Image (cartoon, rainbow, N blue to C red):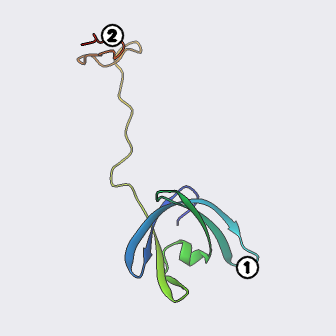
Amino acid sequence: MATINDLVLAHIDQKPAFYARIEDITPDVKPGWWKVKLLVLTVPLQVYTWILDESQVNGAPFTMGGTPIMLEKVVSPEPPVKPVPTSGKGGAKKGGNVVSLFDRKKS
């Protein structure tokens, strides 16, 4: 189920069209329908509010003005980054060099 802060890919006419983040989902005045606020990830950023039923939020195809549309929840292709284990008393793992950008010599 897609929910707030999820990324979705909007398909228009059965073709990928744009990515968006679900900003908010609030009940519409019509029972069983939802106002879905989308932050469309384009330049410039845009905000759309679509009124959808639960199945449409979760990927069921629908039409707007006769145009086929579908939202597909996007799942990251990579697992979340795990924290780097530390060794000993809070020290960092040995073996790497730390180079300060502030200590660089000017050429």
**Could you tell whether 43 is left or right of 54 in the image?**
left
Q: As rendered, which of 72 and 105 lies closer to the eye?
A: 105
The C terminus: image quadrant: top left
Q: CA distance from mark 1 to mark 2?
A: 63 Å
Q: Which residue is mark 1?
A: 31
Q: x and y percent of residue 82 in the render?
A: 37, 37
Tally the marks. 2
Q: As rendered, which of 27 and 10 lies closer to the eye?
A: 10
Q: x and y percent of residue 102 in the render?
A: 36, 13
The extreme bottom residue here reads 66
Vertical placement of 97 versus 17: above or below? above
Dot 1 alpha-carbon crowd within 10 angstroms: few under 14, some 14 to 19, many 20 or more: few
**Could you tell whether 26 is left or right of 93 in the image?**
right
Q: Could you say which disc has been placed on residue 103 in the image?
A: 2
**Residue at x 52%, y 83% (from the top left corner):** 62
Dot 2 alpha-carbon crowd within 10 angstroms: few under 14, some 14 to 19, many 20 or more: few
Q: Could you say which disc has been placed on residue 9 in the image?
A: none
Regarding mark 1 in the picture, which secondary structure is present there?
Answer: loop
Q: Could you tell me the amino acid type at mark 1?
A: Pro
Please tell me in which quadrant of the rendered image residue 33 appears. bottom right
Q: x and y percent of residue 10 in the render?
A: 46, 70
Q: Could you tell me the amino acid type at mark 2?
A: Asp
Vertical placement of 58 versus 19: above or below? below
The first of marks 1 and 2 along the sequence is 1
Q: x and y percent of residue 55 in the render?
A: 55, 77
Regarding mark 2 in the picture, which secondary structure is present there?
Answer: loop
The extreme front residue here reads 107
**Residue at x 28%, y 12% (from the top left corner):** 106
